[in-house]
Image (tube, helix red, strand yellow):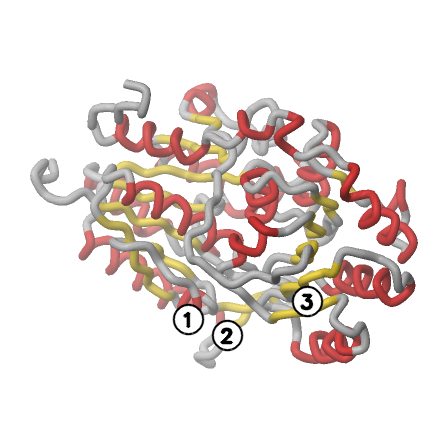
Amino acid sequence: MTKDTKRARRVVLYSHDTFGLGHLRRSRALASALTQSDTVQSAIILTGSPVAGRFTFPERVDHVRLPGVTKLSDGSYVSQTLGLDIDETTALRAGLIQSAIEQYDPDLLIVDKEPTGFRGELLPTLEWLSQRGTTKLVLGLRDVLDEPEVLAAEWARKGAVDATETYYDDIWIYGPESVYDPTKGLILSESARARMHYTGYLRREITDAADTPDDPYILITPGGGGDGKAMVNLVLSAYEQDPDLSPRAVLVYGPFLSGDVREEFETRVAKLDGRVTAVGFDSRIEALFAEAKGVVSMGGYNTFCEVLSFDKRAVIVPRTVPRLEQWIRASRAEELGLVRMMDEARDGMTTQSMIDAIRALPTQNKPSEAGADALLNGLDYVIDRTRTLMGLPALKSAAE
């Protein structure tokens, strides 16, 4: 079966989004690049993110909100709002995914990070698409997933290796091969590895204008914020202990920082007389990155791309649980001279170490001085590769 070659080309991006903002924001950047280049004429993002509606989406990009799930402290999942058990919620999500894809009939499906989807919810759709044979299937992986042994066990448990081998035409790694191989520890066939493409990091830009402070500031961002309590506490303690610490800080809590924790932080911020100001969530955070004098963050994938894209001196305070992804990324980036990492074993997570790190920000090299620009060709690569998969001619460069 073949598609009508004259009809508008379409892409679906699947983003399971059980926690945080990373998958949705990465899918949004990809959808924007593919539609703006006219490689595809429209895009739909399938997402479980509870804050998807708070983002603006580019022209010709829309989203379908899947029923949300919440991960409990013991690692199990529950429905966010529906009162269904997790099996019922997964079945509902799986049905919505397949129905959307059958009706929209995309030329390309890009799956973010999870080859089988949340709890295997993608498998019926992948099998249907594979038998039909008219949609190209791509698995997109961030630059770092987890330490190899943990990743291998997780993928074995989920049947992810088998799904990757069976269904996907391409595997895109959203980072440079020179930085890290996220598939370390996975037993993939030569055929699967031949389908792997290192795209480079996904460059970010200001998509929505926003007001920024007139006075110099450093940006403090724990990403989605759900696991950002320790880092934010450390920054606030630094400004409380050192009354001369400057410049001022703009803190973006993220939408998932708990209400009780945020209330405690708000009380502390209020006592700092404007040296630290805070907002809960800003979907236009790119504008704050662009004007900041430096950044203190936890170092998730999207934040790291923004640090490189806007060429900001950065201190990364990576989490180490439940996975080592951020620590692996930050330590490798520090080796390359792109950022400074605060490592608990080496530096100690003390108030004084944070004061020292903030004071040293102005003397750090910018990422561009370590060759960051050469690492940021991911969106161009994705556009070129998509056109190849669809049998379209390559785009002419500006120089041609």
Amino acid type of disc 3?
Ser
Of the image marks 2 and 3, the number of the one nearer the N terminus: 3
> On the rendered structure, is 322 left or right of 213?
right
Query: Relative to 197, does residue 94 appear above or below in the rendering?
Result: below
Residue at 65% in and 33% down: 367
Q: Which residue is mark 3?
A: 73
Query: Relative to 213, does residue 173 appear above or below in the rendering?
Result: above
Query: Relative to 226, does residue 108 appear above or below in the rendering?
Result: above
User: Measured from the top left, where is residue 267 in percent x and y?
Assistant: 77, 80
Labels 1 and 3 touching (C-beta < 8 A): no
> On the rendered structure, is 124 left or right of 289?
left
* The one of 50 and 81 positioned closer to us in this rendering: 50
Q: Nearer the viewer, mark 1 or mark 3?
A: 3
* The one of 226 and 219 positioned closer to us in this rendering: 219
- State the SS at label 3: loop
Q: Which residue is mark 2?
A: 80
Of the image marks 1 and 3, the number of the one nearer the N terminus: 3
* The one of 184 and 285 positioned closer to us in this rendering: 285
Crowd rating for badge 2 (residues with CA inside 10 Å; few <14, some 14–19, many 20+): some
- The quarter of the rendered structure image containing the N terminus is top left
Crowd rating for badge 1 (residues with CA inside 10 Å; few <14, some 14–19, many 20+): few
The image quarter containing residue 100 is bottom left
The image quarter containing residue 249 is bottom right
